[in-house]
Amino acid sequence: MIVDCAIYRKGRRTPGPADFSDALAEARATGDAFLWIGLYEPTEKEFDHVSAEFGLHPLAVEDALDAHQRPKLEVYDDSLFVVLKPVVYAPESGAVTTDELMVFIGDSFVVTVRHGESAPLHAVRLRLEAEPEVLKHGPTAVLYAISDAIVDHYIDVVGELQVDLEELETEVFAPVGGGARNSAVRIYTFKRQVLEFRRAAGPLAAPMARLASAGVPFVHQHSQPFFRDVNDHLTRANEQVEGLDRLLSDVLSAHLAQMGVRQNDDMRKISAWAAMVAVPTMVAGIYGMNFDHMPELRWVWAYPVVVVLMAGAVYGLFRQFKRRGWL
């Protein structure tokens, strides 16, 4: 459905025709205005009329309706098509999810198609309307403001992930019994969240670098420094999340090594106790074999002596294992 439709003339929102076809014709007629129409999860039928009026390429229209695209930039004869993926972070669950936002810019128009609830279009529109000096640069200003808002939020999400990773490190390297039982599951889950973030931010580097260079159709010729700034922020976010991913791999390796050491300690303890139990078991087993000529069978002190010998042997083994750190 159409969420908003407005004409902007010299950076300010102005009244215009209710029908966006007439509004587009009016914006093009004056030469100093553009039309910004926003759609939220449109159906194919709803989008057909928009695409026909604005001359959008069928392949770009298909991508906008499909909503399962990687971030990209494509240039067509009548428009520029950009796919962005806003990131949503849920502090309660630590989950990272992504939505999709498609931007078409062309001759005196901007069409934004939003899938999901996280795209910051309303806030971007309000911010631009409060800055007419920026908005007067036309559709390029809208594309810049949307890209800037999404990338800045990437940096915020990376900061939240950094905090979560520090908590996870504390849990993994806690003493035995300190709650590290499910650490491997948490590490794997966290790695999946980082991967989801990288799928959104990583592929966006090429489109931002292209927008930061000259010669992109439908982009204002003096906008390169602004897109370079967005690209710098994106590079920082990608570098930070790549560092998180490497650190997470190191934490996982350290956790597995730690679990291996703990298992070796457990095996040594089990082996030590089994050795101590084996001595009295062996002696008692010999005396339980019912021989006719059992040594010291009728000696009144035989039983206490045997028990003392077994206890002494067990105590000797205990001291040896304790000295070597097995117990």
Image (spheres, rainbow, N blue to C red):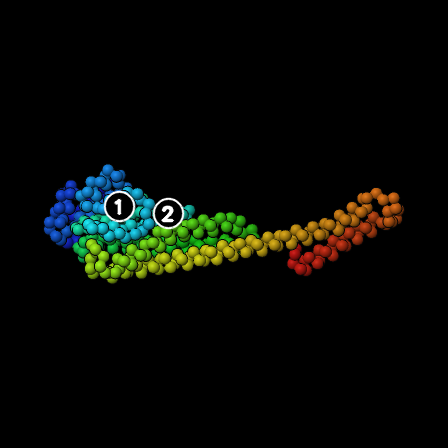
Q: Are marks 1 and 2 in contact (CB under 8 Å)?
A: no
**Residue 11 falls left or right of residue 73:** left
The residue depicted at 62 percent of the width and 54 percent of the height is 265
Front position in the image: 23 or 202:
202
- Residue 97's disc is 2
List x then y, in percent, for residue 3: 23, 42
Is residue 132 visible in the rendered structure shown here?
A: no
List x then y, in percent, for residue 175: 55, 55
List x then y, in percent, for residue 33: 14, 51
Q: Quadrant of residue 140?
A: bottom left
**Residue 42 falls left or right of residue 22:** right
Residue that numbered label 1 is attached to: 59
Q: Amino acid at mark 1?
A: Leu
The residue depicted at 47 percent of the width and 50 percent of the height is 188
Q: Residues within 10 Å of mark 1 (few under 14, many from 20)?
A: few
Nearest to viewer (mark 1 / mark 2):
1
SS for dot 1: helix
List x then y, in percent, for residue 44: 26, 39
Figure quadrant of the C terminus: bottom right
SS for dot 2: strand
**Residue 282 falls left or right of residue 73:** right
Whichever of callouts 1 and 2 sits on the residue coming sooner in the sequence is 1
